[in-house]
Image (tube, rainbow, N blue to C red):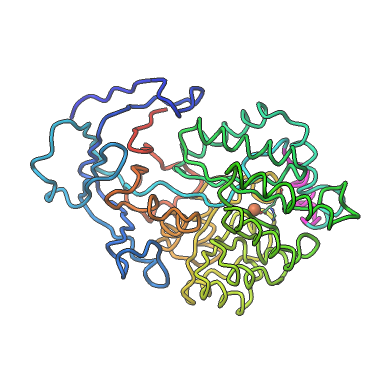
């Protein structure tokens, strides 16, 4: 095996500040992989269906003693070692993965990663018995993050976010969605989306951007909620849509936040301006957000702790991905979403961290997998599917990422564990041995 040389280059689009060195412009051959988790679409029926439902979620497409070849950033071959084409040129860096598990990079399809300040005091208050809603009613919660985020400069927000993104990547997440929603006025929401856009251009990790001006009513519109909805609809969405500042539009559809009718208005308008709909639904109460998601063809409905049977039916009919956030229920000591029921009803189930300073201060996808197994009774196989190919579907990206398939992005993690089941089982430890992003081998 040729010696690996890690080059620190100034390759465009790679963060100069990130503590990584990386090997550029080479093709990679990962050989002798003990266990390759492909999640390949070869196994679904029809073969071009890029997500898994029901029992398919337990079929990971495992190949033992495997090889993966990545050329020009894309997966060009995978399979058994003995089937490796003999005529491959020598122009490859070979990396021996004996004793290692290899799988697609994790996709975190729901975060609020850009924010000012932190809310550790609220964490302590909850330990002492106060609830998330009580703290919010006293002016804490989302609005306390809004106050600090408004004051923060773009530079400060970026610096803080960058630290989180680097850590996430080291823990195996190769694609992350980031929402706005701590600005809640025109300039501050655009500031947040600008920060997300710049991070997307500069960082190694892939970033998807979501506008959620409808995250809460800001204090200055407390007595004029319609005025804030007009600001979102008349000014923010047209501006964001025209400049393509976000991929998705999201709404916190909940009692005391945005009602179903207003959520529908905002998401429908967002769609007209090129922003695909997502929705925070049924988090604190059964409110009708899941029914709305199916009706308007949302790409995903997220949270769903209080989803009803009608809501489940609507997600299924509308082919809406259900993004479950086990870290939130764990962190807030709230009820968990009915994962088993959703899976048994054929809904596309994904899991994400919802990383944010209030309801889940963690961006560890493996930790979410563990919680989903212990508290939602998902199987180790189902949580792996929910963190990769189905999470990619929740971002409308399952043609590009989320599985080991020919032509997909070379986003791969090498895990130092005896088999894939150790990922949720041996928790609280980072099992990621190496990360490969767009075919580039990262070293840190
Ligand atoms: O997804 N539920 C609404 N929004 C966030 C919480 C944000 C916060 O508390 O700052 C969530 O859990
Ligand atoms: Fe959220």
Q: Is residue 158 above or below residue 222?
A: above
Residue at 81% in and 55% down: 130
Magenta segment includes 165? no
Start and end of the magenta stretch? 118-132
Left or right: 146, with 323 as reference point: right
Q: Nearer the viewer, residue 373 or 250?
A: 250
Residue at 19% in and 26% down: 2
Residue at 24% in and 55% down: 63
Count of number-bearing discs: 0
In which quadrant is the C terminus drawn?
A: top left
Q: List x then y, in percent, for residue 236.
A: 71, 47
Q: Is residue 193 above or below residue 383?
A: above
Q: Nearer the viewer, residue 353 or 175?
A: 175
Residue 90 lies in what quarter of the image? top left
In which quadrant is the N terminus drawn?
A: top left
Left or right: 244, with 82 as reference point: right
Q: List x then y, in percent, for residue 397.
A: 44, 53
Magenta segment includes 126? yes
Residue 411 lies in what quarter of the image? top left
Q: Nearer the viewer, residue 411 or 127?
A: 411
Q: List x then y, in percent, for residue 171.
A: 47, 41
Left or right: 328, with 94 as reference point: right
Residue at 52% in and 76% down: 317
Q: Dominant secondary structure of the magenta stretch?
A: helix
Left or right: 329, with 103 as reference point: right
Q: List x then y, in percent, for residue 8.
A: 39, 20
- Residue with the most extreme right position: 223
């Amino acid at each position: 095996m040729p010696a690996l040389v890690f080059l620190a280059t100034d390759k465009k689009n790679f963060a100069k500040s990130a503590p990584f060195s990386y090997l550029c412009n080479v093709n990679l051959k990962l050989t002798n992989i003990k266990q390759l988790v492909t999640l390949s679409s070869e196994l679904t029926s029809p073969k071009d269906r890029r997500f898994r439902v029901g029992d398919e979620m337990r079929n990971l497409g495992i190949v033992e003693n495997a090889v993966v070849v990545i050329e020009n950033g894309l997966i060009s071959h995978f399979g058994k070692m003995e089937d490796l084409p003999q005529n491959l040129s020598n122009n490859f860096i070979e990396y021996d993965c004996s004793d290692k598990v290899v799988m697609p990079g994790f996709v975190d399809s729901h975060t609020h990663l850009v924010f000012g300040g932190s809310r550790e005091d609220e964490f302590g208050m909850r330990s002492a018995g106060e609830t998330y809603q009580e703290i919010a009613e006293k002016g804490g919660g989302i609005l306390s993050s809004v106050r600090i985020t408004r004051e923060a400069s773009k530079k400060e927000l970026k610096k803080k976010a960058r630290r989180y993104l680097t850590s996430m990547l080291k823990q195996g997440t190769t694609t992350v969605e980031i929402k706005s929603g701590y600005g809640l006025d025109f300039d501050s929401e655009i500031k947040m989306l600008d920060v997300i856009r710049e991070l997307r251009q500069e960082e190694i990790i892939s970033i998807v951007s979501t506008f959620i001006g409808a995250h809460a009513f800001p204090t200055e519109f407390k007595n004029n909620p319609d005025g804030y909805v007009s600001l979102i609809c008349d000014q923010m969405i047209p501006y964001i849509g025209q400049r393509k500042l976000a991929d998705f539009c999201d709404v916190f559809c909940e009692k005391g936040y945005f009602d179903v009718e207003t959520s529908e208005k905002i998401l429908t308008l967002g769609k007209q301006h090129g922003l695909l709909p997502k929705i925070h639904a049924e988090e604190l109460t059964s409110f009708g957000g899941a029914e709305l998601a199916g009706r308007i063809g949302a790409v995903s409905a997220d949270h769903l702790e209080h989803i009803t049977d009608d809501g489940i039916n609507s997600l299924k009919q509308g082919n809406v991905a259900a993004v479950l956030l086990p870290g939130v229920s764990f962190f807030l000591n709230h009820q968990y979403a009915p994962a088993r029921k959703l899976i048994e009803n054929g809904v596309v189930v994904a899991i994400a961290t919802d990383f944010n300073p209030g309801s889940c201060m963690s961006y560890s996808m493996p930790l979410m997998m563990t919680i989903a197994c212990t508290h939602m009774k998902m199987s180790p196989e189902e949580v792996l599917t929910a963190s990769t190919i189905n999470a990619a579907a929740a971002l409308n990206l399952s043609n590009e990422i989320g599985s080991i398939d020919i032509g997909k992005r070379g986003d791969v993690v090498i895990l130092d564990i005896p088999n894939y089941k150790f990922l949720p089982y041996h928790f609280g430890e980072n099992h990621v041995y190496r990360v490969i992003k767009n075919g580039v081998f990262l070293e840190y």
